[in-house]
Amino acid sequence: MSNVLITALYKFVALPDYEALQAPLQEACQQNHVMGTLLLAREGINGTIAGPPEGVARVLDHLKADGRFADLDHKESWATEMPFLRMKVRLKKEIVTLGAPEADPTCQVGTYVDPKDWNDLISDPDIVLIDTRNAYEVEIGTFKGAVDPVTASFREFPEFVKNHAGLGTKPKVAMFCTGGIRCEKASSYMLAHGFDEVYHLKGGILKYLETVPQEESLWEGECFVFDERVSVKHGLDEGSYDMCHACRFPITEDDKRSDKYQKGVSCPRCWAEKSEAQKERYAARQRQMELAEMRGEVHLGQIDNEPRS
């Protein structure tokens, strides 16, 4: 039975006092047995938390008691086990790192498109459709016909735009990402650089997979998520991918049958990149994790996901 509520949330809003919000928010999460990661910056909040439904609800109430978060939107899904190991409220320069000050979603963003209207928009021949996620995310699933910027991090997105003047050959640009945050910030960047008609998927891929029936969907594959589920499918059901805890990339059952795969140590993607010393260190960590699991404990060296760019 799925009884752990997972809630992804973000909001771009001016928070000049963001540092003062950290300790009370950390306390509210801990008191309500909620775990995960929340990022606070001058430009807003971003993160994913999980816990008992009533605990998550109380954390959301805590946030919404601040008028700046009164209309905070979030996405919900369920898991049978807690996907995070601890609770972290972190202070950052940006809630999603682009490194381009001209991209300011608190001042301007593109046009939000509801999931129910997304298929019609991206079927328009005058649209350039861009997946603003990283290459390893695109690899396991994307919308049909989307441009893959082939980025290793969101910081590389401005360089992609700079090197692809052809993006301006069509009058409209539509963008999407996992939960909506990266494409929202990317839309602000595009507007700041002279693109006039810019759209982005409200609530991201997760909201689309949650609300659009599979038989009507233009999504192909699965969607990478930043928790122990690794990927989700339509209806936000848990996907088929696992994770290599050495490189934190998604892996398939075929990958795990490779002679280059060793649980917690390497996979076909990272096997050649890791030194023998690294592999020995990862193997020792994996043994400690397995011993901790046998004792019913959580090993603090275990990797848990958090919002990444």
Image (cartoon, grey):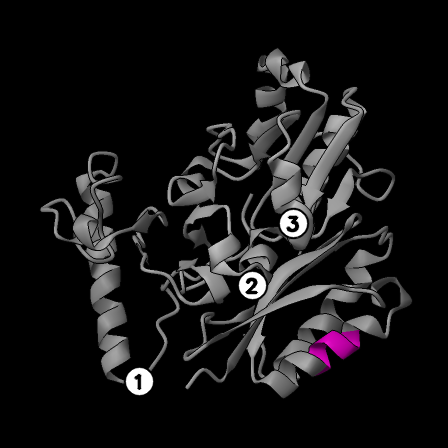
Around disc 2, counting alpha carbons within 10 Å, would you say few (fewer than 14), some (14 to 19), or many (20 or more)? some
Q: Is residue 244 left or right of residue 170?
A: left
Mark 1 is on which residue type? Answer: Gly
Question: CA separation, marks 1 and 3?
Answer: 37 Å
- Choose the circle earlier in sequence order: 2 or 1: 2
Query: Label 3, on which residue?
Result: 180
Q: Tell me if residue 67 comes above or below residue 282 in the rendering.
A: below
- Choose the circle earlier in sequence order: 1 or 3: 3
Mark 3 is on which residue type? Answer: Gly
Q: Residue at x 28, y 50 (%)?
A: 251
Indicate the quadrant containing the C terminus: top left, top right, bottom left or bottom right.
Answer: top right
Query: Label 1, on which residue?
Result: 296
Q: Residue at x 73, y 27 (%)?
A: 190
Residue 210: mark in rendering? 2
Q: Secondary structure at mark 3?
A: loop
Q: Is residue 8 left or right of residue 197?
A: left
Dominant SS of magenta comes to helix
Q: Secondary structure at mark 1?
A: loop
Q: Tell me if residue 291 comes above or below residue 69 in the rendering.
A: below
